[in-house]
Every structure is written in structure tokens, then in C-alpha cells.
Image (cartoon, rainbow, N blue to C red):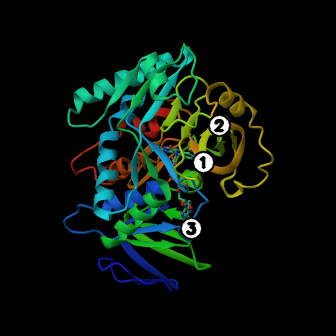
Amino acid sequence: MLHVCSANAFSPVETRGINMEHYDYIVVGAGIEGSWTAYQLVKGAEKKPSVLLLERFPLPHSRGSSHGQTRIIRNAYPDAFHTSIMPTAFREWQKLQAESGVDVLVPKPLLLIANEEGYKKMDKIIACVNEEKAKQPDADIQLKELSREELETEFPQAKFSSQHRACVEHTAGILRADKCVATVQSEFKKLGGVIRDGFEVTSVVPGERVTVRGRFNNQAASVTASKLAICAGPWASKLIDPLLPTKLPLEALRILVFYWKIKENGPGAIPSTFIDCGEGDFWGIPELEYPHMYKLSNPSYTDQVEPDDRDKNVGAPDYSSIADYIEKYFPGLEIKPSIVETCMYTVTPDLTCILDTVPGHRNIAFGCGFSGIGFKKAPAVGIMIKQLLNPEEEKILDSTAFRLSRFSTD
Ligand SMILES: Cc1cc2nc3c(=O)[nH]c(=O)nc-3n(C[C@H](O)[C@H](O)[C@H](O)COP(=O)(O)OP(=O)(O)OC[C@H]3O[C@@H](n4cnc5c(N)ncnc54)[C@H](O)[C@@H]3O)c2cc1C
């Protein structure tokens, strides 16, 4: 039997032996996107709506895409639609930190590197940042191109070639991922939000009242809501495809993450996060997780996976291309990984997320396909999903670029 925990939820109605609770909103999926969406729905509202956040696994869990210790947060992107939402996302993370008293965001410069292959991307990043600074003069975005001498002086631990160009975003940082998820959920609960973990949603029935069916404590269960948001990460297609005329263009990928020991008597590791805009899209995060380890990986260590089978048949990874890269540019790191972990990306063909409503059902919205860049944006995603479900309210962020229709061939 389910219990109504929200003061605002309507009285339960018995329906064929199932206790049907009704909420103003239900959000499916308590990863970072669903958690922020639930929080944004309840936060700031004068009359607090009843909001239920459903999660199939007991919380906290490491089966999706939002677990672990760190994620990079930055403003610097080569696409205006990404850069433009970041000042809002930053402000929301900072507010969360101030309100909760939990250190979720660690300021840390980001080093962007580009060989000739990456010059175009680097130029686009610089142009986007300058454009955004002109549009949002209050936004704190500091991006500086480094001279060859500055690169060598500020990052003596790396040996980039004379062809490399470099920029540093001094306003970037690291989000402490697990703490972020837990803190958003706890702030959501403080505002009266209800979280029910161990509830696996199996189907959604659209209507003026959306019915969400699933299994809770090994029993069939059913809840209803006036509005529904689905943020199911790598499992998104399973829940959303049955509601759409065509399948979502999503692929779940297993990604391997490598940690490399910092040599005892070497030059050390660079003290910043790091993204290579040209050669292989490598990225790195300094010693904030395991002591004396630099995290460095690239998206080539991915393969398509059934999300429930993420850790099956991982095998011994061939990490030679990362080791070669480290040998070339990071003499302070050992070239054999000390730790290998698995996680999942959910990607779209253009590596940009989808935020939309179900055609014909404006009261069902969804967010998916956040790839390897979605964590930092989650507060903004929550705002945009709230806007999609409430088109009559003031629009704070433009989500046009994230519509599903961009993949339409008509
Ligand atoms: C290794 C790695 C490094 C990354 N680095 C960065 C970075 O530096 N910066 C950055 O911004 N982003 C980064 N990302 C990307 C970011 O972490 C993801 O984009 C983001 O976590 C996606 O969150 P999500 O909420 O969509 O998915 P998830 O975290 O997977 O959440 C989905 C949730 O829905 C639940 N669910 C699914 N189906 C159901 C169901 N039927 N019923 C109930 N619950 C359900 C799942 O159990 C899960 O908890 C990285 C990702 C990885 C894997």
C-alpha cells in the first residue's frame, strides 16, 4: 500500500485494488536531470505544488549516468545555445550551495588545448563566449587565450607542442557529482517534495490526468499526475518511445573512465581540468577523487550497451591510445591506468540533448540524450522542462535548439 506523504496531494482513490495517489507533477528518474527538474518545479512557487520524484533503484545508486565524484562545469562551448544557458546554470548551482551549506561546486580553471585540428573549434568557443558576454554583461565568464610562454609557465607539468593553442576559463569548476545529486534531492524534500525510490515505472498512460504504472516493493502500483516529466537517462527510449510516432534517436553507450597515477618524482599533473578541442576529444580532471590520481579519458572508449548490462563483458580494455597521448603530453603521469570505472552516456546524433513535450500531450515533457555534457546544465534543464509544462508562465531560457523536431526528415 502506498502512503500519501505530500500535504498537497489529493486523497488517495482506490482503483482496482491499487491506491491511486494524485500529484500536480510526477518526475520519473532521480538522476541529476530528474532531481533538478523536480526541485525547479517546487522551488520558487508561491503555492507549492505537490511533486513526486520516482526512481527505480534504491537511492543513492551508481547504475545510471550521474554517479561518481566529479563533473566539469564550464561556460566555454562552441555552440551559442549551450553557452547561453550556462550563466543561469552556474547561478543555480551557487544558490544551491549557499542554501544547503554543502560544497557542491569547487572553482577550478579549465585548460582548453587545440592543435591545428582544433583551431576552428577553439575560435568558435572564443566567439561564443564573447557573444554571450555582450548579451549577458552580468554573467561571470572569464576566458583568456594564453601565449606560448604563458602556457609553459602556468602549466609546466604538460609538454604541448609549439602548434598548440591554449585558453583558460578561470570561471570554470568541478561539481562534486554524488554530493550534487544528494543535495538537490534533500533540498527538494525540504520544500515538501516526495521521493519514492524502488519504484520502477513500466508504462505511462496519457490523459488529462497522466497515469504512471509501475512496480513498487514488488507490487503493481499506479499514481496519477496533472503533468509528467520523464528524465530516465539511458532508459529513456523504453518509456518515451511508446508515446511517440517514431523512436527517439538515442543510443546508450558504456564509457570507460581511467585514472592515472601521478609519478612520485616527476613534474606532477596539471592542477586544472582539461579538454582537448582537437586531438581525440581527451578530457581530464585533477586529483579531487582518488589521492595522487589524474582522471583522463576520451570518448573513443565507448561501446553501445543495453543499460541494464552496463558492467557485463567489459573485458580488459586496450588503453594504448590514451597511454600514447599521456606519454606525448603528460610526462608526470604513469602510462598504465591504476583504476578503470564504467559509466554511461546517452547520445543523440548531434550530441545535444532533447527537451520537448509528447505530440498531442502538452502535459508530458521529457529530457534525454545528455551525452557527456549534461551534468552541469541540469539546473537549466529543470527550468526548461518546467517551462515546457507551463507554457503560459514567463520564459527564462530558450529551449528551441533542443526540440526533437530537429531530427525530423519531413
Ligand atoms: C564518465 C562520465 C563523465 C562525464 N563528465 C561530465 C562532465 O564533466 N560534465 C558534465 O556536465 N557532464 C558530464 N557527464 C554527463 C552527465 O553525467 C550526464 O549527462 C548526466 O548525468 C545525465 O543525467 P540523467 O539524469 O539524464 O541520467 P541518469 O543519471 O542515468 O538518471 C536517470 C535516472 O532515471 C532512472 N530511471 C530510468 N528508468 C526508470 C524507470 N522506468 N522508472 C524509474 N526510474 C527510472 C534511473 O535509474 C536513473 O536514476 C559525464 C558522464 C559520464 C558517464
Residue at image mark 3: 56
| Coordinates of residue 137 in the picture (x, y in percent) | 20, 32
Whole-number angstrom distance, CA of label 3 to CA of label 2:
39 Å
Label 1 C-beta lies within 8 Å of the nearest ligand 1 atom = no
- Amino acid on which disc 3 is placed: Arg
- Amino acid on which disc 2 is placed: Leu
Label 3 C-beta lies within 8 Å of the nearest ligand 1 atom = yes
For the residues bearing labels 2 and 1, Cβ distance under 8 angstroms? no
Q: Is residue 364 above or below residue 402?
A: below
Camera-near label (3 vs 1) is 1
Q: Residue at x 70, y 47 (%)?
A: 338
Name the residue nearer the viewer: 336 or 90: 336
For the residues bearing labels 3 and 2, Cβ distance under 8 angstroms? no
Q: Is residue 249 above or below residue 211?
A: above
Going from the N terminus, do you reach mark 3 or mark 2 first? 3
Is 255 on the left-hand or right-hand side of 138? right
| Coordinates of residue 166 in the picture (x, y in percent) | 46, 22
Residue at image mark 2: 333
Can residue 230 be seen from the camera position used here? no
Going from the N terminus, do you reach mark 3 or mark 1 first? 3
Can residue 295 be seen from the camera position used here? yes
Q: Residues within 10 Å of mark 3 (few under 14, many from 20)?
A: many
Q: Residue at x 55, y 18 (%)?
A: 115
Residue at image mark 1: 292
Q: Is residue 130 above or below residue 291?
A: above
Q: Residue at x 36, y 71 (%)?
A: 189
